[in-house]
Amino acid sequence: MIEFEREGEVMRVGMKLPLLPLRDLVVFPFMVVPLLVGRRKSVKATEGAMKGDKMIFVLTQRDPEVSEPKQEDLYDVGTLAKVIQILRLPDGTARILVEGLIRARVSRFHEAGEFPSVEIALLQRSVTMTKEANILLRSVKDHFKEFIRLSTKIPDDVLHSILSVTNPERFSDTVSAHLSLKIEENQRLLDTKSLSEHLQLLNRYIAQEIEILKLEKKIEKEVKTQVTKSQRHFYLQEQLKAIKKELGYGEEETEEAEELTLAIQKAKMPKKVEEVSLKELKRLMRMPPLSPEATVVRNYLDWLIAMPWQKRTKDNMDIEHAEKILDQDHYGLKNVKERLVEYLSVLKLVKRMRGQILCFVGPPGVGKTSLGKSIARAMGRKFIRASLGGVRDEAEIRGHRRTYIGALPGRIIQKIKESKTKNPVFLLDEVDKIGLDFRGDPASALLEVLDPEVNSSFNDHYLEVDFDLSEVLFICTANVTHTIPPALLDRMEILRLPGYLEYEKVWIAKGFLIPKTIKSHGLSSDQILFTEGGLQNIIQKYTQEAGVRNLEREIATLCRKAARGVVKGFSKNPKGKKKKVVVTKQSLDRYLGPPKFFEQEIEKEQEVGVATGLAWTNAGGEILAIEVGIMPGQGKLILTGHLGEVMKESAQAALTFARARAKLFGLEQNFHEKLDIHLHIPAASIPKDGPSAGIAIATAIISALTQTPILRNVAMTGEITLRGIVLPVGGLQEKFVAAQRAGVKTIILPKKNERDLKELPARTKKGITVKLVTNVDEVLTTALLKDPRTTSPAILQREETVYAH
C-alpha cells in the first residue's frame, strides 16, 4: 500500500496498478481530461480499475503508431490518475474521465494477464518557494497572460481561473496542460524533479509559443492587407469604369462584348453551348482587360465561336461521278472502290447515315492516304488528315484542361475547326503506331471518337461541351492490325489493300507517276520517253516493294538526269533539234547504275533434293529454292536459312510424314537413325516464316531420301499435315506473278484454293498449268521425275557422305 498527501488529503493506493498507455497525450497532475479508450487491453485495464479503487496509471507511448506497446515503447514517468466516470459504447470502446493525482515512475512492469499492470514509485518533488522560484513563477504568469492574449484558442475566463490558483505546483501543472506542446516537451515537464526546474522549463516553452503566435499574427495581417488591397483595386476599377463611361471612354470593351455576342449568335451553337458561351462572356466583361484569366477566357470563346456547329458541305451523290474520280486517281483496288460506292449509294437513299469508320490496311506505298483524298473529292467534302504515328499523350486526342498554361483542344477538334465543316472526310493516319506511356493511352481516347454510338456527343477536355462527330467520315490507315488494340479494331471496318503486281505498277507509272513527275520537273513528253521494257526493268531490278514509292523515286531520278541535260544545253544536237532521253532496258545502267536487285530464276537442271516453293512478302511474291542435303549421322534435322517457328514446324511435320511412309518409299524403317538431314533456304539474312512451304519441304526431303530428281519448272505452295493432307494458303496472286517472272510452267496448289484461283485475273494465270491436289502423294506424282514409291533407296547403300545437290 502506497500513501501520499494531495492538498492536505491523505490518499492510499495499492502497489500494483492497471496501466493505460496513451498515444499522443501527456496527463499532468491536477488535470481532468476525457479519454477515448479503444484498444482491448486498455478497455480491460479501465474496467479493472473500476472494480477496485478506481486508480489507474497513465503512461505516454514514445511512438504513437505502436498498437501493442511493450515496456520499451513507453516513457518511465507517468501520472497516477483516478477514473471519475466511464461510459461504455456499443462498439466495445469506452469514454472515460480521469483526474491526474501525482507523478510516479514505473518500478516494475507486468505483462501477464488480461491487461498490463505496473508497480510504481511516487516522485515527491521539491516545492520550496525560494526567491528564484518566486521570480520564475511571476515570469510564467506574465508570459502566460501574453500567450492567452495572442492565442485565439483559449478563452479569457480560463486565464482568470488559472491565475486564481494559489498552489504553485498546481499552477505550473495547469499551465503546462493548456500549452500546445510536442509530446517530448510535455514529457520533459512531467519528468522535472523540482518546482524550480519545472517553472524554468515552462518559462522557456511559453516564450517559444509566444514567438510562434506573433509570427502567425504577422502573416495573418499581411494576408489581410493583401486582400484589402485587392478589394480596393476592384473598387477603384469599378469607379474607373464608371468615370470612363461618363467621359465616353471604354467603348472599346463595350464594342468587343457586342461583337462577341453577335458572333455567338451567328455561330448557331446548340442551346447548352450558347449558354456556356454567354456565361463566359459575362465573366470576361467583369475582368480587368489585361489579366491572365481574361486572355484564357477570350481564347476559349474564340474556339467556341470558330467551331462549325451547323456548317456542313453538300454531298455529291452522283455515283457515276464518284466511280470516275476513284478510277482516275487509283488503278485497281476493285473491292475498296466497290465498298465506297456502296456507302454513297446508301447515303443517297437514307439522306443521313451514322458515321462509318473504315480502316485501310496494307503495306507502305499502296495509296492508303491518297485514297482518302480521292474519297473526299468524289463526295465533294473537305479532307483533313491527322498523323497519329508516335502519339503517346492522351491529351493529343482529347485536349488539355483550361487550367493548364497554354492549353489547347486535341487534334480532333483542331482539325474539325480547320476544315470549317462538321462533315469532312477525316483521315487518321498510322493508327497502328500509337504509343502508350505514363501520360495516358491515346488508343483508349480514340474509342469514343470512333464509336458511332457515342461520338455524337464527343467531349473535348478544353471545350468541355459536346460536339457532334457522327457526320464525319473517319478513315484510318495502318500497315498491320496486330498492333491495334482489340477494342479499337472492333470499331472499324477493315479494308485490305494488297501490294501492286508488276503489270499494275506499269499501268500506274504510265497513267499517274510519269506524267506527274515530268510536269513537276519542268519537262515535257518531247524530252523524255519511258518504254514499257524500261519500266518493267526498273520495277524488277531497281525496286522491291509492295507500293510504288521507290518506283516514283527512280522515275524522278531519271527526270532529274534529263533536266540536267536540258539545263546544260546538251539536249540539242548540232542541227538544233531537241534530243529526247529514251529510257530502255539498255540505258538504265547508264542512268541508274547497276541493278539493285536480281531476278529470281528456277533451276537450270532437274536436281535431287531441290524444290521450288512460292512465298508472299510485303513487296510481292517470291520463289524459294528449298535445298535438302542427306549425310550419314545420328538422325538430326538441321534447319538453316533464318527460318521462323512455323516453318521449322512444317519441316518437322514433313520429316514425320516421310518416316511414316518409309516402307512405301523403299526406305529402311529406321533410316532416320543413320542419317542427318540438312534443310536450307538461301538468302539466310532474310527472316522466313509461314506454313505455305510445307509441301515443298516434304517434296525436297522425299526427293533427297529416294534420290529422285524434281522437275525444274514445277513450283508449289501449300501447308502439310502429319497425314499428308494439303491445306489452303493465301497470297495466290503475288505467288503466280513471281512464278511467271521466274519461268515456272506448272504450279501445284491445294484443292481448297480452287475458289481463290477462279478470282485471279486471266493474265496472272497465262502460260501456267495449275495442278490442284488434296494430299502429298498427288504432289509427288506431279513434282518428281518418277514415282518415288518404286525407287530403290540407293543412298542408304553408300557409306560416303552424299549431298543431294
Image (spheres, rainbow, N blue to C red):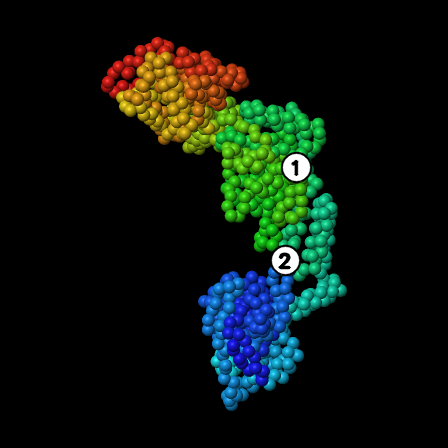
- In the displayed structure, 790 sits above or below 113; it is above
> What label sits on residue 293 in the rendered view?
2
Q: Position of residue 41 (x, y in %)?
A: 54, 63
Q: Which residue is drawn at 57% across and 41% down?
A: 444
Please state which amino acid type lies under the numbered disc 2. Answer: Glu
Could you tell me how far apart the alpha carbons at marks 1 and 2 are, in whole angstroms?
Answer: 36 Å
- The residue at the far bottom in this view is 131
In front here: 557 or 324?
324
Viewer-side label of 1, 2: 1
Q: Kindly state the secondary structure of the residue where label 1 is placed.
A: loop
Q: Mark 1 points at which residue?
A: 453
- In the displayed structure, 34 sits above or below 337; it is below
Q: How many marks?
A: 2
Query: What crowding class fits label 2: few (fewer than 14 Cα within 10 Å), some (14-19), or many (20 or more)?
Result: some
Judged left or right of residue 19, residue 237 is right
Look at the image and tell me in which quarter the C terminus lies. Answer: top left
Q: Where is residue 711 in the image (x, y as percent from the top left)?
A: 37, 13
In front here: 629 or 9?
9
Q: Which residue is drawn at 55% across and 43% down?
A: 442
Q: Residue at x 36, y 19 (%)?
A: 659
Q: Residue at x 55, y 31 (%)?
A: 360
Please state which amino acid type lies under the numbered disc 1. Answer: Glu
Q: Kindly state the secondary structure of the residue where label 2 is placed.
A: helix
